[in-house]
Image: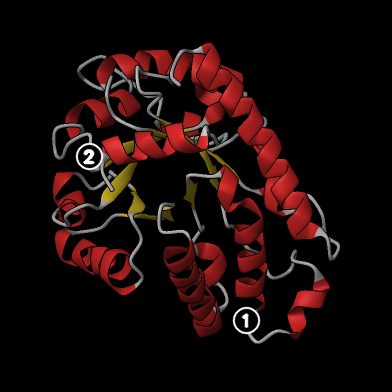
Amino acid sequence: MNCKQLFLNIKNKKSFLCIGLDTDIQKIPSFLLKYKNPEFEFNKLVVDATARYVIAYKPNIAFYESNGPDGWRSLELTISYIKKKYPDIFLIADAKRGDIENTSRMYAKTFFDTIEFDAVTVSPYMGKDSLLPFLKYKDKWIAVLALTSNQGAEDFQFLNTRQNERIFETIIRRSKDWGSINNIMYVVGATKASILAMIREIIPDHFILVPGIGAQGGSLKEVVKYGKNKNLGLIVNSSRSIIYADNTELFAETAGSKAKETQNEMNILLKQNNII
């Protein structure tokens, strides 16, 4: 899926919503625990209730790795299910990988060959050679951590470099030409929305993946105001405020309602900004 196809999906669905499938077996409704793969059953019901309102899903890999082989099996089943039933949906592995080239090659194989995600989040700390193995895959993406929404982002990401720019600016400026707008996007937290306008000056045409609305308190309206480009260029993620909005047997129905509410807000913003 390339940049043009992503935007077409946004136009068709009048949405740029990504739902994070951060499925915690300690938080899912207890009646699901009777199933062989309770995480998968939870995901399947959430996906079926929300797929019409989203353009992407983003499973956080830690929630599956923590449950060992059973967790990985649930992840594989989830991705296979979405690809078969909803092939237009973009699948992002929230894995934050990045290591020496030889190791990154294995990470890329894991998320692009073995489980067949469309994209994976990566850490750029180790530089160009740690990301190139991911970029060798045709029609696959990396989402480069640039400016995150957590409090600790202030520890390093805002430090000035010798070129008198902040580290997150240097990361974006140097890495944007390692690939193209069709295989590199950037992660910028919604709680840093006002900085998106400056980031857009560096990457006017790239997609930006924005976590942090919903439970983390980011403003969707501000994200669009500061972060949009002529084709929107945004994928905005919400996780807990949708998938854990209800802990009863009606949890999937509630998740669908929450996703629809967000999609309705996105539709209004897309029209107000003359994007659709």
> Which numbered dot is residue 37?
1
Q: Nearer the viewer, residue 116 or 133?
A: 116
Q: Front-most of 64 and 30?
A: 30
Q: Where residue 254 appears, x then y in whole percent?
A: 78, 51
Left or right of 151, for residue 176: left
What amino acid type is highlighted by mark number 2? Asn
Badge 1, how many Cα within 10 Å: few under 14, some, many 20+?
some
Q: Secondary structure at mark 1?
A: loop
Residue at 51% x, 58% y: name it: 59
Vertical relation: 3 (above or below) 131: above
At x 70% / y 35%, what residue is drawn?
261
- CA separation in Å, label 2 and label 1: 35 Å
Image colouring: secondary structure
Residue 65 visible in image: no
Residue type at the position of mark 1: Asn
Work out which residue is located at the far front of the displayed protein and give it. Answer: 12
Quick one: quadrant of the C terminus?
A: top left
The mark that comes first in sequence, 2 or 1, is 1
* Residue plotted at (74% across, 53% down): 244
Q: Secondary structure at mark 2?
A: loop
| Farthest-out residue, right | 248
Please tell me whether residue 16 is drawn above or below residue 240 in the rendered image.
Answer: above
Residue 132 left/right relative to 122:
left
Q: Position of residue 213 (x, y in %)?
A: 62, 33
Q: Which mark is residue 65?
A: none
Identify the residue at horizontal 72%, vertical 51% (top origin).
255
In the drawing, what numbered circle is on residue 182?
A: 2
Q: Position of residue 196 (x, y in %)?
A: 43, 19
